[in-house]
């Protein structure tokens, strides 16, 4: 007798949303998305690409309910706009168009790409992914975007490039937090090229079938679902490839608490609090945290030969 044991991220087919419901949702969103174009600050082809309905990738099942949109978009860390979780009013001043991204460092040819040109060269998809903050709260979000490996492909890194650094926007006329000079602005963080090429690494341009709102990292951000959320730079303006392991924003501030790899592990506590459980936004239910945030099947091999590395913080 064959006994089938489902993996932690798998759901039975009966739990999948019917296609008719998904397509109906997409159609209903169409009018709302068109009305929101001016708010998002995007127009024309770029807006069409960011807002276009994307097919959901069924490979990445969340294993839990999607967080209500109102909760995921109203409880945010974005220190450039303030240190509270209610940064939306300030973040709405962010200028998101035109938007360009610079590719430099160890690449075949340094260059800048406009968001519109970049999106013409990738295929968008939707992924429902879990997000785990080092502060021990979590959310589950339907993100629109493309695999980070596609960004690496467009950058054309040289063979000696081993790490990627993402630098984020520093708009002094819209970001009051930049006046706090004790923070190491501009915000930057990075990963290894191997991590960037892993199938779980994602570049998001939208959420809940809409363009990213400013407080969630408009117009383009990085996602590493198996890492703590501080490893997910928002509002990316520069991607640099280098041979040396970079030191990120939070590691510069407090290296004893925040490290380069920052993989989720419920058994390794933050110096000031436990990581054994997490609070779900929207319900405030506490659930056990899973190693690699439940994505170990996809990413654990990246760290197989790193027993002497501090891979959890």
Image: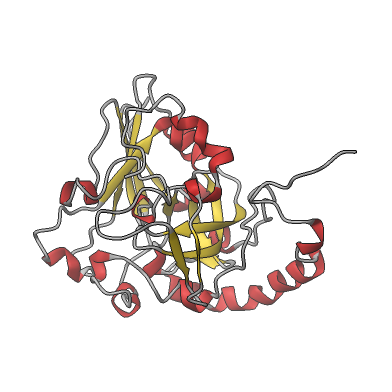
Between 143 and 200, which is closer to the camera in this rendering?
200
Is residue 297 placed above or below 227 in the rendered structure? above
What x and y, as percent, mark residue 153? 49, 33
Instruction: Residue 73: give x, y in percent of width and height.
Output: 45, 73
Please give left or right for residue 293 compared with residue 20 in the image. Answer: left
Q: Is residue 38 visible?
A: no
Name the foreground residue: 101 vs 147: 147
Asked whether the viewer can see residue 233, the reply is yes
Q: Is residue 217 shown left or right of residue 22?
A: left
Image side of residue 308 versus residue 141, left or right: left
Toward the left, the furthest residue is 181
The residue that appears at 64% across and 74% down in the rendered structure is 29
Q: Nearer the viewer, residue 25 or 252?
A: 252
- Report the colour scheme: secondary structure
274 w.r.t. 237: above or below:
below
Q: Is residue 206 above or below residue 184?
A: below
Q: Against 229, is 32 above or below?
A: below
Spot occupied by residue 150 in the image (x, y as percentages of width and height): 52, 38
User: What quarter of the picture does the N terminus occupy?
Assistant: top right
* Quadrant of residue 56 within the rendered picture: bottom right
Which residue occupies the extreme top position in the image?
159
The quarter holding residue 214 reads: bottom left
Quick check: 278 left or right of 167?
Answer: right
Residue at 75% in and 45% down: 5
* Total tally of numbered discs in the picture: 0
Q: Where residue 199 sits in the image (x, y, percent)?
A: 56, 39
Of the 4 image quadrants, the one containing the C terminus is: top left
Residue beneath the point at 76% across and 63% down: 15
């Amino acid at each position: 007798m064959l006994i089938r044991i489902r993996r932690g991220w798998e759901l039975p087919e009966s739990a999948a949303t019917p296609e008719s419901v998904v397509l109906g949702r997409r159609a209903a969103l169409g009018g709302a998305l068109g009305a929101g174009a001016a708010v998002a600050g995007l127009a024309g082809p770029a807006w069409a690409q960011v807002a276009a309905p994307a097919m959901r990738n069924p490979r990445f099942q969340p294993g839990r309910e999607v967080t209500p949109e109102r909760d995921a978009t109203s409880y945010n860390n974005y220190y450039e706009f303030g240190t509270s979780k209610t940064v939306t009013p300030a973040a709405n001043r962010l200028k998101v168009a035109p938007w360009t991204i610079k590719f430099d460092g160890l690449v075949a040819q340094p260059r800048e790409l406009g968001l519109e040109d970049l999106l013409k060269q990738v295929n968008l998809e939707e992924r429902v992914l879990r997000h785990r903050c080092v502060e021990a709260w979590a959310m589950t979000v339907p993100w629109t975007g493309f695999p980070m490996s596609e960004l690496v492909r467009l950058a054309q890194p040289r063979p000696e490039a081993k790490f990627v650094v993402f630098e984020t926007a520093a708009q002094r006329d819209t970001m009051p937090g930049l006046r706090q000079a004790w923070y190491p602005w501009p915000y930057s963080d990075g990963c290894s090229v191997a991590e960037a090429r892993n199938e779980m690494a994602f570049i998001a341009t939208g959420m809940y079938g809409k363009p990213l709102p400013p407080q969630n990292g408009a117009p383009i951000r990085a996602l590493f679902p198996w890492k703590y959320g501080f490893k997910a730079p928002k509002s990316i303006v520069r991607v640099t490839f280098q041979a040396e392991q970079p030191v990120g924003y939070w590691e510069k501030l407090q290296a004893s608490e925040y490290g380069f790899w920052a993989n989720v592990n419920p058994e390794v506590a933050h110096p000031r609090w436990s990581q054994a459980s997490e609070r779900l936004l929207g319900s405030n239910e506490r659930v056990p945290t899973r190693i690699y945030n439940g994505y170990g099947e996809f990413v654990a091999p990246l760290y197989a030969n790193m027993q002497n590395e501090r891979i959890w913080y």
